[in-house]
Amino acid sequence: QVQMVESGGGLVQAGDSLRLSCAASGRTFSNYAMGWFRQAPGKEREFVATISQGGEMTYYADSVKGRFTISRDNAKDTVYLQMNSLKPEDTAVYYCAADPSRVLLTTDPKQIGSWGQGTQVTVSS
């Protein structure tokens, strides 16, 4: 399985921006659909965004559509999540996920087999 390391989280104010990165290793990165999930305290892990192997297709949760942008650089084995207009409800640990068997990641976290360690994003009001 691919190994993933997230970075870029931090403490920001509402309305600010952050860019998360997920560096992958161990397998051919371009074979994997990639994506981001998040988990707030006391809540279930939820889908955020996904991108296809070549980057041509993306899909977002309604809660982040228009504010977040997922992208990937297959030459750097890295997927990004640009987060703009952040809200306090975006506060969560953000996890990178990978799947070689789908064009886009499933939105069901129970079906994800590979996770990164997570990076904390905290948005103050």
Image (spheres, rainbow, N blue to C red):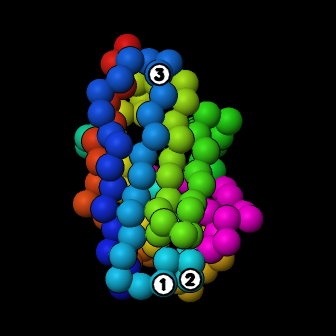
Most foreground residue, 22 or 114: 22
Dot 3 or dot 2, earlier in sequence: 3
Residue linked to disc 2: 31
Contact? badges 1 and 2 (CB < 8 Å): yes
Q: Marks 1 and 3: which is nearer the front?
A: 1
Q: Quadrant of the C terminus?
A: top left
Tell me the element at label 3. loop
Residue linked to disc 3: 16
- Quadrant for residue 18, please give it: top left
Tell me the element at label 1. loop
Residue drawn where x is 48% and y is 28% of the image? 17
Q: CA distance from mark 1 to mark 3?
A: 34 Å
Residues shaded magenta: 46-59
Q: Amino acid at mark 1?
A: Thr
Magenta stretch holds residue 51? yes
Residue sitting at the far front: 75
**Can you see residue 45?**
no
Q: Find residue 28 and name its label.
A: 1
Residue drawn where x is 52% and y is 36% of the image? 83
- Quadrant for residue 74, please give it: bottom right
Q: Amino acid at mark 3?
A: Asp
Where is residue 14? Give x, y as percent: 44, 18
Q: Quadrant of the N terminus?
A: bottom left
Residue drawn where x is 56% and y is 78% of the image? 30
